[in-house]
């Protein structure tokens, strides 16, 4: 048994704690779940544990459940077990097969009172699907381009399954060098701490690293209510979030809405709650247009292909069948292609979607690839809902689709979009599709606007201002565009 085990698995991982459990999981992954047998007998040995041992420690110990470093290590190990062709681990270990939190490494920072320094620490729920972590990932990528060291702190929203893994887009950015996941028990300092999604602050969470920040920004990427109709669901208590921010990080910070519509919602509907909070300039999402731009416009089809991409929630759709059919026309002249699901739209339509609808569920296609196949992007939503920013809007622009929106978006996107009331949409689309020069001119206007207002350079300017540093020279010319 020893020879085949050593040949395929090698050695225990070179970490300070948790290597025994990882080796057993690796053993089962290679040789099957029956490779380990629990003997039906009394204990054959007793574990030695003291108050000062790692296993008994408050931060890195095991107290009947995984948290902090142990939980993050286990998640990284499971990903390695699922994705690697070989689960062999050598000794002495010269290159780690997967990332481990810094406190678990033999070459860790041994000064318990010293703080490891990061340029930026980002705080969010990095498990969430959708726009929140698309935006987090884009800012991490921009900070890498600037040569900054970024630390990530997980604060969880309570409606998600606690066993849910980190978003793959975030995992792809964590390299253990320029981007690290920080865990409970670590002491950290940073020039700038950025909290995205204030909901994560609402419920006090125990297992959070100790972070001292010179400056704090709270990015309000969604209004505190689901919508602003009577009896609408309240998503977070602003006052409690503000109090917990100070408890966690010692500063009230500057709160930054991601767009003018969120700012209007805060000042109109939450003025009393925001009275003691500094509300700063907007903090729009960013994107690298060069990564999204399609090589060419699709060849003409018999029908005009309208694309739409969003979460499948009632607030993301028009609220009546009449409005729905005005902006997403039925009939042979159009195809409506939806990414993200359309059950909420089906309910609005009385349980049946028109025959010209083609629905791709969330996660079944990459947004960039999906958008590249279509002609125009049309985005109309529930009239009582406040769209925070609409990341999907500028993703469509970056790909090269003309975008049709209600006029409420004009203060944010200016001439990068085409604005129409619902009853005007069909005729406006048909006119644009009949004029190739106008189509291309709109695409190029949108590209220029998105690069200027939502490119990486804007992120360099705003975080540089918060940190007291000029970060623009660190960007390559293309990334700075």
Image (spheres, rainbow, N blue to C red):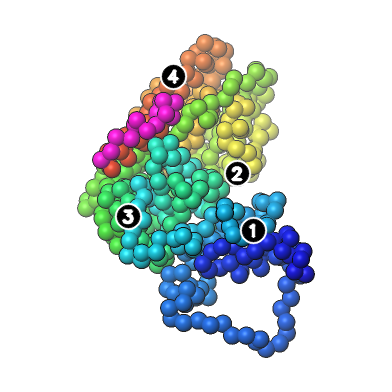
Where does the image place residue 185, in percent across and percent down from the top left? 40, 65
Q: Nearer the viewer, residue 104 or 319?
A: 104
CA distance separating discs 4 and 3: 42 Å
CA distance separating discs 2 and 3: 37 Å
User: Which residue is denoted by mark 2 in the rendering?
Assistant: 362
Q: Earlier in the sequence, mark 2 or mark 3?
A: 3
Q: Earlier in the sequence, mark 4 or mark 2?
A: 2
**Mark 4 nearby-residue class (10 Å; few <14, some 14–19, many ≥20):** some
Q: Earlier in the sequence, mark 4 or mark 1?
A: 1
CA distance separating discs 1 and 2: 36 Å
User: Which residue is denoted by mark 1 in the rendering?
Assistant: 89
CA distance separating discs 4 and 2: 29 Å
- Horizontally, residue 36 falls left or right of residue 261, namely right
Q: Nearer the viewer, residue 425 or 31?
A: 31
Q: Earlier in the sequence, mark 1 or mark 3?
A: 1
| Residue at the image position 62 percent from the left and 27 percent from the top | 373
Q: Which residues are magenta?
A: 468-481
User: Which residue is denoted by mark 3 in the rendering?
Assistant: 189
| Residue at the image position 54 percent from the left and 11 percent from the top | 435
- Horizontally, residue 412 falls left or right of residue 21, namely left
* Secondary structure at numbered mark 1: loop
Taking the magenta stretch, the answer to whether it contains residue 469 is: yes
**Which circle, 2 or 3, is nearer the viewer?**
3
* Secondary structure at numbered mark 3: strand
CA distance separating discs 4 and 1: 53 Å
Q: Earlier in the sequence, mark 1 or mark 2?
A: 1
CA distance separating discs 1 and 3: 33 Å
Residue 346 in view in this figure: no
Is residue 67 shown above or below 311?
below
Q: Which mark is residue 445?
A: 4
């Amino acid at each position: 048994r020893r020879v085949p085990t050593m040949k395929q698995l090698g050695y225990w991982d070179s970490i300070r704690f948790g290597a025994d459990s990882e080796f057993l999981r690796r053993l089962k992954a290679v040789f099957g779940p029956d490779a380990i047998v629990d003997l039906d007998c009394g204990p054959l040995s007793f574990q030695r544990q003291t108050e000062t041992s790692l296993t008994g420690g408050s931060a890195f110990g095991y107290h009947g459940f995984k948290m902090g470093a142990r939980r993050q290590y286990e998640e990284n190990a499971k990903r390695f077990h699922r994705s690697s062709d070989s689960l062999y681990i050598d000794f002495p270990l010269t290159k780690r097969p997967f990332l481990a939190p810094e406190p678990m490494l033999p070459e860790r920072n041994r000064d318990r009172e010293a703080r490891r320094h990061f340029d930026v620490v980002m705080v969010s729920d990095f498990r969430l699907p959708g726009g929140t972590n698309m935006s987090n990932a884009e800012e991490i990528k921009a900070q890498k381009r600037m040569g900054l060291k970024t630390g990530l702190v997980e604060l969880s929203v309570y409606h998600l399954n606690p066993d849910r893994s980190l978003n793959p887009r975030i995992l792809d950015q964590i390299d253990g060098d320029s981007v690290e996941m920080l865990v409970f028990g670590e002491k950290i300092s940073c020039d700038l701490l950025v909290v995205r999604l204030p909901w994560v602050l609402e419920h006090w969470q125990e297992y959070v690293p100790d972070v001292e920040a010179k400056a704090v920004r709270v990015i309000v990427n969604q209004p505190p209510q689901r919508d602003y109709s009577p009896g609408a669901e309240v998503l977070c208590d602003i006052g409690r979030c503000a109090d917990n921010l100070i408890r966690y990080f010692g500063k009230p910070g500057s709160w930054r809405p991601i767009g003018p519509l969120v700012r209007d919602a805060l000042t109109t509907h939450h003025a009393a709650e925001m009275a003691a909070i500094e509300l700063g300039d907007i903090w729009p999402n960013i994107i690298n247009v060069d990564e999204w731009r399609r090589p060419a416009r699709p060849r003409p089809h018999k029908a005009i292909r309208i694309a739409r991409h969003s979460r499948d929630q009632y607030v993301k759709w028009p609220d009546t069948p009449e409005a729905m059919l005005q902006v997403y026309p039925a009939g042979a002249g159009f195809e409506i292609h939806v990414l993200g699901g359309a059950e909420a739209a089906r309910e609005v339509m009385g349980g049946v979607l028109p025959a010209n609808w083609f629905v791709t569920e969330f996660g079944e296609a990459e947004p960039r690839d999906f958008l590249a196949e279509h002609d125009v992007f049309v985005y109309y939503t529930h009239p009582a809902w406040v769209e925070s920013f609409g990341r999907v809007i500028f993703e469509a622009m970056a790909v090269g689709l003309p975008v049709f929106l209600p006029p409420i978006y004009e203060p944010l996107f200016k001439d990068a979009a085409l604005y129409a009331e619902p009853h005007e949409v069909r005729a406006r689309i048909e006119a644009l599709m009949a004029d190739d020069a106008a189509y291309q001119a709109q695409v190029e206007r949108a590209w220029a606007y998105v690069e200027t207002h939502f490119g990486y350079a804007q992120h360099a300017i705003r975080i540089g201002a918060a940190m007291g540093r000029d970060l623009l020279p660190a960007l390559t010319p293309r990334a700075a565009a």
